[in-house]
Image (cartoon, rainbow, N blue to C red):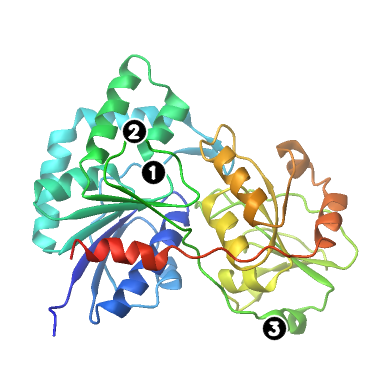
Amino acid sequence: MSAKVHIVADISANGFGHLAQISPILMALAKVRPGLKVTLRTEVDPIICGQFLDIPFKIGPTPPDPNMRMKGPLDVDADGLFEDYQNLVADWENVITSDAAVLAALKPDLVLTNIAVASVAAALRARIPVAAICSLNWADVFAAYCGTDGEARQIYDHLTNAYAAVDRFIQLQPHMPMDWMPSVHSVGPVARIGKDRRGDLQAARPADHYVLATMGGIPGMHTQVPLPEVDGVMWVVPPEWESTRTDILSRKDLDIAFIDLMRSCDALVTKAGYGGVTESAVNSTRILYTERTNWCETSILETWIAKNCTGRHIERDVMQSGDFGAVLQDLLAVPITKQPVRSGVDDAVAVLMQLL
């Protein structure tokens, strides 16, 4: 019998999308390597981590991974982003030396990062195999908001050089090009598939259609969107949203996991992000979305949505005004005919097994 494997998984805490990407892969690895030991290093609440992972895990020291500063669910704080990576690069040697010692003490067989750049350098310093897995990387996100002139160019080059040293970079479709990255392996999308609990929704509050609304999982960024009253539609909204309307049902009053709601609802209203887009596709749920300002994945996601989702785009001001009832009605009338896309989980596991 093969020895038990220990993986340290470093997960960026810019919402829950990075956790959503990595958790199905960790669970699949646990099936092929029984007794898999997982140590999570992340600022995501351990309770939330447990909602995504149905395998045992421990929480380790937080990795040196600047969280993207936001001005709201749709707007990045570019000045804050620049400052955070400026500080990281300026103190790079101390940061990497310190984190390498932490990783060495944990004694993993593999470091898997989604997608802390310092984790790559620290793992290599500690002589531990390291793989990155994501649809994007923070270097190209930095360049999209901060440019590549002057000091920004120096920071960008530093980050890309650090990423480029990784043993494997597994790109989850739909992904940014990353043409500068060696050792890349492109695999299909990784997204959770929920259970159909439509009956529980009907028992909670009967309706013809259920529409799930969310602006993402960034703590403190649950900006409430005004929702139109649409005949036959019951809105399912985040626990933080307040309303006394009878056509709005709060998730806090439902004992149903978010991904099961995704599977059970007729449509998702959201911002365009990897998790919402891919999960709507694999769960055969319509998607009505708006874009994030200057987000570097937007065009890639929209191309993928057109091919793989039953969806509609609305402008940001329309979303924020709540004047999208007619568009939603039209979307709900469209039959879902597109076939669910093939998951990339097994392919990602095959790549990682080469490092174990």
User: Pointer 3: residues within 10 angstroms few (<14), some, or many (20+)?
Assistant: some
User: Pointer 1: residues within 10 angstroms few (<14), some, or many (20+)?
Assistant: some
Give the mark, 2 or 1, whose residue is nearer the N terminus: 1
- Secondary structure under badge 1? loop
In which quadrant of the rendered image does the C terminus lie? bottom left
Q: Kindly identify the amino acid type of the residue bearing the numbered disc 3.
A: Asp
Q: x, y (%) of residue 84?
A: 34, 33
Residues under labels 2 and 1: Cα distance? 8 Å
Q: Kindly identify the amino acid type of the residue bearing the numbered disc 2.
A: Asp
Q: Which mark is residue 98?
A: none
* Residue occupying the point 46% across, 46% down: 175
Q: x, y (%) of residue 231?
A: 91, 64
- Secondary structure under badge 3? helix
Residues under labels 2 and 3: Cα distance? 45 Å
Please determine whether, in this image, residue 282 is positioned above or below residue 90: below
Contact check, label 2 and label 1, Cβ < 8 Å = yes
Location of residue 279 (image quadrant): bottom right
Give the mark, 3 or 1, whose residue is nearer the N terminus: 1
In the picture of the structure, the residue carrying the numbered disc 2 is 84
Q: Is residue 268 left or right of residue 95?
A: right
Contact check, label 3 and label 1, Cβ < 8 Å = no
Location of residue 193 (image quadrant): bottom right
Q: Nearer the viewer's eye, disc 2 or disc 3?
A: 3
In which quadrant of the rendered image does the N terminus lie? bottom left
In the picture of the structure, the residue carrying the numbered disc 3 is 200
In the picture of the structure, the residue carrying the numbered disc 1 is 67
* Residue extending farthest right: 231
Q: Is residue 90 left or right of residue 84?
A: left
Q: x, y (%) of residue 61?
A: 22, 57
Give the mark, 2 or 3, whose residue is nearer the N terminus: 2
Q: Kindly identify the amino acid type of the residue bearing the numbered disc 1.
A: Asn
